Amino acid sequence: MEERVLMKGNEALAEAAIRAGCRCYFGYPITPQTEIAAYMARHMPKAGGSFVQAESEVAAANMVLGAAATGTRAMTSSSSPGISLKSEALSYIAASDLPALIVNVMRAGPGLGGIQPSQGDYWQATRAAGHGDFHQLVLAPASVQEMADFAVLAFTLAFKWRMPAMILADGTLGQMMEPLYLPKRPDRTPADRTNQAAEPDWALTGTLNRRSHRIINSLVLNPAALEASVFERFARYRQVQAQEARWRYEGPEDPDVLVVCYGSVSRIYKQAIQAVNQEQGLRAGLFRPQTLWPFPAAELAAKAKHCKKILVPELSMGQFCDDVKLATAKLPKPVALACRAGGQVPTPAEALQRLKQTWACWLQDQEQEEVYYGDRQL
Amino acid sequence: MATVSYERPEALLDVPFHYCPGCTHGITHRLIAECLDELQMTGQTIAVASVGCSVMAYDYFACDVVQAPHGRAPAVATGIRRARPDRFVFTYQGDGDLAAIGTAEIIHAATRGENITVFFINNAIYGMTGGQMAPTTLEGQVTQTTPWGRNPAEAGNPIKVCELLATLDGPAFIARVAVDHANQIHQVKATIKKALQCQLEERGFALVELLSTCPTNWKMSATEAMRWVHEQMRQQYPVGVFVDRLREDQNSGRGGSAGGRHLSGPSAPEAVGLTALPAGYTHKE
Ligand SMILES: Cc1ncc(C[n+]2csc(CCOP(=O)(O)OP(=O)(O)O)c2C)c(N)n1
Ligand code: SF4
Ligand SMILES: [Mg+2]
């Protein structure tokens, strides 16, 4: 039986990760994700795993690299400034074809910024997680339930495709409490960590003088060989794009306004959409990507085909909107962007106003693409 | 009948080294491999190669190897050891790697007493990138980035890693040796072996600093380079044992393993009298 509990998003993620077989957690304190580290410090040893408070995010992410190289399920978590420091190891993890989980509970930037929720690391997560040509899986939860579910999914996908997976959450999702069903406890015991049969054939487990040595490495000095390995990795990425895109749609079949957003901001707009659909005149729908990489581009384009206008609310300055525009470029539909930054989050009333405002704009001029900075229309 | 008295250790693969003539990386690799053989550790060992001239150590050692980002080998080793406490881990790091970019990682791995062995190659230079100043570059030493010699007023002072780490409570064994003469080989090997022994016995962090040559970037012949280690580097970096908890435990009768599980293996070599060896150079070599 699934267990129904009331938990904070950060703690639900941590518990689910342990249940998903995570046996190494390495982290460094930073608000608003520290509950993950605190939970791991308490519960990881009981699960037979290892918790280390590292000297920095750089070290924590490199500890993940080491643990992942042994085929162990390992993770780290941080918030925006700390994720910048993890980018070195992320690039090496991707280049070494290792699976690992990295959690970013985003706060507002740039710089030290603030500690309130933000989605300002979208580009970093989906475009430039580190140097060089590589991708990571990016999962975007919108509830405490998904914080837990995606911890499990992230490990499954990371091991399936041998690449790093990031859960891109924000302060709201990390801090809020909601009831959820925890994933089932695995039948496997922690002792299975050292079970030879369960070990993947690429893992560094010691040769035991029975096989030739394995090397996990990202240095390839021969340009032709390096190009070939990058081509091969990107061929795999194309399969990931074809198979792993996930999204949710709620609303009428052919909405007038298609709202496209992810994470915590989608919860606020969901309320506004429900309110507007109860009135006469405007029909709105919500398209919410659950994976940001791979981006559900084809699915979004199909959904957007019959709408009149697209509204993209985000807690950043148009980073996510870029992907929406790319996905719908061939239609094309007018796209309005509603930005909040600095840790500011729209109220349900503000979301309702934005919806009505963008629809009023469309009634006046069917090609207009407005941008909202908070309440200010540009 | 002919007997084989010298052959390639099994822990070293039959692959030609890429190191320059007179470079001590190769000697050190061989000595580590001999110790892995003698302690029968190879099959259970996962090595961490760092960024520097020795980056391709992964091609040479017969154990599993992961290549770490510049300076992060102790963090990567921590991850491996935590994930697989039943395996041995050693890192092989240069002075730029360990004492500049990786300073935080080595200090914290040491203070946590991670059960890993670190081989620290101090050649007073950034070898791989073509001879820039290292944190260990001697005062007055000419490098690509200290063209008039290292001036401490501008470029800071050489870092003494062993002395620094010996202030911590975490390490079980810290020693410095010099790979500067054939008469040092037994001592260097015994020290390497002892550092590995520490891990076998789960005593925690062990580090061996090896004063090493880089004839190419020092712009010296192989013999000149050896002599420079002997005459210049030893002044700044005296060889010796800085921490030896194995010995303390033996003396106090404590013995046994800190980590609980005692792995059997050959007993530790006698503690080596590192400063006692006579100088091996005449001035007409
Ligand atoms: C993050 C990063 N910075 C810089 C470099 C370039 N780099 C490669 S090797 C090296 C110096 C290595 O010197 P050392 O650790 O002393 O090793 P040696 O070559 O002397 O054995 C540097 C700076 C790099 N690879 N990665
Ligand atoms: S450059 Fe120096 S350290 Fe590198 S292989 Fe040559 S001699 Fe050795
Ligand atoms: Mg060096």
Image (cartoon, rainbow, N blue to C red):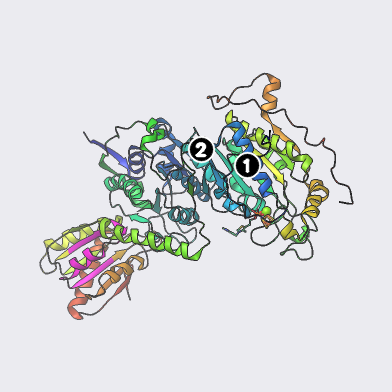
Q: Can you tell me which quadrant of the image ligand 2 is in?
A: bottom right
Q: What kind of residue is marked 1?
A: Arg
Q: Which mark is residue B8?
A: 1
**Amino acid carrying mark 2 in the image:** Arg
Relative to B174, is B224 above or below?
below
Q: Is residue A170 visible?
A: no
Q: Measuring from the top left, give residue A39's x and y in whole percent.
A: 40, 38
How far, Cα to Cα, is label 1 from label 2?
Answer: 28 Å
Q: Residue at x 43, y 34 (%)?
A: A49
- Vertical arrangement, residue B79 with respect to residue A97, above or below: above
Residue span colored magenta: A285-312
Report the side of A220 relative to A337 (left or right): right
Outermost residue on the front side: it is: B1
Q: Is A306 a magenta residue?
A: yes
Q: Nearer the viewer, residue B268 or A352?
A: B268
Whole-percent x and y of residue A225? 47, 62
Marking on residue A180:
none
Q: Establish whether labels 1 and 2 are both on one chain.
A: yes
Q: Position of residue B210 (x, y in %)?
A: 70, 44
The quadrant of the picture occupied by the N terminus of chain A is top left
Look at the numbered disc 1 and give the secondary structure of its residue.
loop
Q: Quadrant of residue B151?
A: bottom right
Q: Nearer the viewer, residue A349 or A330?
A: A330
The residue that disc 2 covers is B81
